[in-house]
Amino acid sequence: MPTVLIIEDDSTFAQIIEAFLTRNGYIVKWANSIKKAIEILRIDSFELLLIDYRLPDGNGTDILNFRKEFSITAPAIIMTSFNDVRTAVKSIHLGAADYITKPINPDELLMVINQVLKARAYEEDIEKNISDFIKGESEAAQRLYQYIDLVAGTDMSVLIQGESGTGKEVAARNIHQQSKRCDKKFIALDCGALSKELAASELFGHVKGAFTGAVNDKKGCFEEANGGTIFLDEIGNLSYEVQVKLLRALQERVIQPVGSNKQIKVDVRIVAATNDDLMNSIKNGEFREDLYHRLNEFKIQLPALRDRGVDLDIFIDHFIRLSNKELKRDVKEIDEETRSLLLQYDWPGNLRELKNVIKRMVLLTPGILATADSLPDEMKIAVASAKSHVNNPSDLKAVNESNEKALITETLIKVKYNKSKAAKLLNIDRKTLYSKMERYGIE
């Protein structure tokens, strides 16, 4: 449960807020002065600070300065009277995440707290993803970094293409970080997860009453990211109607929230990504050609992991270090068989799959040496099957035997090596199953 420190000298008001937040699943502590708050902050850590601006021994900026000096990462919300709003806004520049005016509506307070904590979690996720980023040394990788360096300093729209798991969002974040917009927001939106009805609202916002469920005004990504960068993942999934609105926003630099007659000027950079063939979608009338050309001012093709050569070894070692740190393990080596399997596998899920497999491997390795037992069985089957096909590309008998071996192995895994169940599923008798297992060297 999230922990909150309330810094408020009005004991009645503090107790009301404390009781309300406790009922909503928060763990709350209370300090009635700056001195008391600092004493608590020196001992305990919190996920949120709720600070009254006017306190008996100073004001909220004193806490904000202490927070900054001692690198306290918990976001802060300032509570202030309406007359002090201008001062509260100044506190934003000292690091406060938001402010709320008194008298406080409990539901409004809960909404602001949830928004601040959600934003903090998102920032931590960004920091984690960036820490996961490591440069490869292959020719394909060097070309990729050269393109990112080249386009980052411009305001050109970028279209990133690549298979699932190749790191499209990480590339987009690096473009933003190296751009002149780096001190503004980077907002990522998965268009594949948006319904047709919600896409326009998420992008452009809506006004209260615009549709069923619109109980409050809402800012869209364009307004939230004004001055910064929006990353639109799986751009090909946007409906045709939303594509029209997006094109207008990009061309005219104005948006119109759903249900509103008001137009809002915006200045954002778009980085879009897809693993689809958008040209094919254009031919089928599913994607607007004019929007495609507006998004595709500069295209970056992310290489698949299987095409990155020496980078695979680099990424394996990198993800082992990350997994050791996260899982409190001490894997230092991979035996020859395991590394061979990792290098031979074609990684259809690319970097995302590699990261997950390495994390599982580290978790299942109690000592310093990782062995093939810690790798998924289906991965071993895929490598063995691919090797058989390479060795006998036109040998129909070999191909059939390879497929038979893979099917038997998969079935045995499925039934946890219960031979009777496996034979029944394969529609053969136990004697035949034993014979084939011996023939194919299945233990």
Image (cartoon, helix red, strand yellow):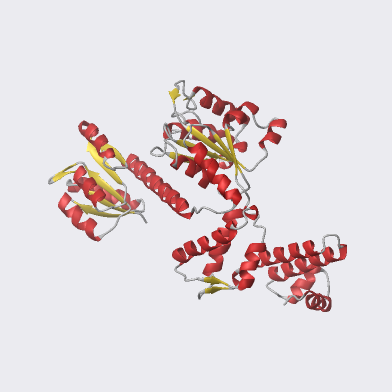
Question: Can residue 233 be seen at all in this image of the molecule?
Answer: yes
Residue shown at the point (68%, 67%) measured from the top left: 380
Question: Can residue 33 be seen at all in this image of the molecule?
Answer: no
Residue shown at the point (50%, 54%) measured from the top left: 134
Which percent across, then down, holds residue 23? 34, 52
Depth check: 305 or 434 in front? 305
Depth check: 306 or 366 in front? 306
Which percent across, then down, holds residue 253? 48, 24
Question: In the picture shown, does residue 262 fall above or below 32?
Answer: above
Depth check: 388 or 210 in front? 388
Residue 32 shown left or right of residue 397 in the figure: left
Which percent across, then down, holds residue 184? 40, 37
Q: Residue furthest top?
A: 261
Residue 138 shown left or right of residue 37 in the figure: right
Quadrant in which the C terminus appears: bottom right
Quadrant in which the N terminus appears: bottom left
Question: In the picture shown, does residue 216 fall above or below 392?
Answer: above
* Count of numbered circles on the image: 0
Question: In the picture shown, does residue 9 fall above or below 397?
Answer: above
Residue 435 shown left or right of residue 273 in the figure: right
> For residue 353, what is the image quadrant?
bottom right
Which percent across, then down, holds residue 233? 56, 41
Question: In the picture shown, does residue 336 fall above or below 299?
Answer: below
